[in-house]
Structure formats: structure tokens, C-alpha cells
Amino acid sequence: MLARALKMAFWVTYDHLGKLILASLLWAIPLLLLGFVALTAFLAGGLVIPLAVGAPAAVLCLAVALPVLSAGLAHMAKELIETRDGSVGDMFRGIRLYWRRAVGLGCIYLIAVSCLTTSAWFYASKLRDSAPWLGYGISAIALWGLLFCALTALLAPATLVQKKSNVLGTIKLTALIVLDNPFTSLGIALQVVGFTIFAVVVPPLFFFLYGGVVVVLASSMYELLARRYAALECAGDARAAADAGRGPVLDDEHDDYLNRGFRDFLFPWKG
């Protein structure tokens, strides 16, 4: 599953490189501006500027701009995967369609991450002398919760635009997908971490592509998992469903993104 998701994401990016660079820039610029304002305010010292400027800018960046822009990119990626065509305009259509639910998702994730981060520090620190094993145990659970939040947050924009559910429905479905596919989800997350390092170390092209590549990768994973679940559903009984899960999935044999090789990369005009 991971290899196929990477293959699909690569060819989607390859076919629509120019569009994704532009969309990634539109995704990155507001985040960079808000992040710069927040960081500058926090480094100013004191309490007034960090609380009056830094905190609102950080919340606006993480709970509003990031999820809304990512939902727009996910809608664009959905069109690129399903129709083999699309434009940057699809990103703005996605923002218009999903911005309210995306803000809801962003706020819930920000609250969850804040609470889990505080818990991971608080219990390990405060119970270090009186009940260290209890404190470290609770902190470990909080850290696992943070990892789970990160894995679901990566897939949440794709789930939102594919299922068009409400905020709680999107979170529930995304959590179930991650729980049912932990290794695939972790593999995708590790690929994102690797690409993040690569984008920082080897700019500027990969930096300019960052948002588009990450969202396309998550959207490719969702698309292939959706096909797999459709195959399982069509298989009927449990034994046939298990066989269908190991075999070919729906539409793979007709999917151009999954049926190309190195020759197509070297000689695209011969496809």
C-alpha cells in the first residue's frame, strides 16, 4: 500500500508539477507570514506583545490558515487524481466549500495537541518525586496521543474533501482509518518527515513544492485505501474479503498513475 501510494503521488506531482508549485506557494506564503509574526512577537520578550500579537498569530496560523489551505489543496489533489486534470482554481473552490469545517478541525486539533503536550510535561515533572512511574506512564500515554493526532491530522484534509462529512464525522473516520492501517499511516508520516528535511536542506524547488507534495501523498493514500475498502465490501463474506485485501484493488489496472515505470519518466512522449 505504501509503495503504491508513493508511486501515485510521484506521477500526480510529475504530471501537474507547475500547478502544484503555484498552489504550494499560495499555501506556504500565508503560513510563513503568520509564523514570522508569531515568532517575532514571542522573541520580543515580556508578556504584552507575545500575548497580544504572538498568540493570536500562532492560533490563526495553526487553527485557521493551515487547515483551510490544506483542505483547498486536498480538493485540488482529489481532482487531479480522479479526473487527471485540474487547476489552481480547484484549490480556491475547495477553500470556499470546506473552510468552516476545516477551521473546526484546526481548532479541535490545536486544543488536543495543547492539552496532550501540557500533560506530557506536567505529569512527568510534578510526579517525578512522589510517583515517578505514574507520572512517566501518563506522560507516555500523552506522547502516544500526540503521535496519533499527528497521523490523523495528516489524513484529515483528504478525508474531509472525500467524504464531505461534518467535523466530528471527519475526525472519527480518520481515526478509524489510522487505527485500521497503523503501519501504512506511520510509513506515510515518515515519508513526510523525510521530505520535510529534504525540502529544508535542498531548497528552493522542493521547498516550493512542499505543501502540494504532502497533501498529494496523503490524498493518494486515502484514494488507495478507499479502493481497498470498496473491494472488501464487494467481496462479501470475510474469507473472500481477506483475499480481496491481498489481491488487486478496484481500478488499479486502469489507473494510469499506477501503471507507469522508469521508461515513462525518461521518455514521457512515448506513453
Image: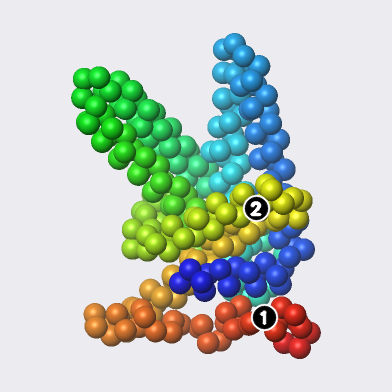
x 57%, y 54%: residue: 194
Can residue 186 be seen? Answer: yes
Residue 180 vs 126, above or below: the answer is below
Q: Which residue is mark 1?
A: 262
Q: Position of residue 22 (x, y in %)?
A: 76, 56
- Disc 2 crowd rating (10 Å Cα; few below 14, some 14-19, many 20+) is some
Callout 2: SS = helix
Quadrant location, the N terminus = bottom left
Nearest the camera: 37 or 69? 37
x 75%, y 80%: residue: 266
Nearest the camera: 206 or 154? 206
Residue 271 vs 133, above or below: the answer is below
Give the residue type that dot 1 points to.
Phe
Callout 1: SS = helix
Can residue 88 be seen? Answer: no
Give the number of marks. 2
Of the numbered discs 1 and 2, the one sitting upstream in the chain is: 2
Residue 164 vs 197, above or below: the answer is below
Per the rendering, the mark at residue 244 is none
Residue 27 vs 10, above or below: the answer is above
Q: Which residue is mark 2?
A: 198
Nearest the camera: 91 or 205? 205
Q: Position of residue 162 (x, y in %)?
A: 50, 63
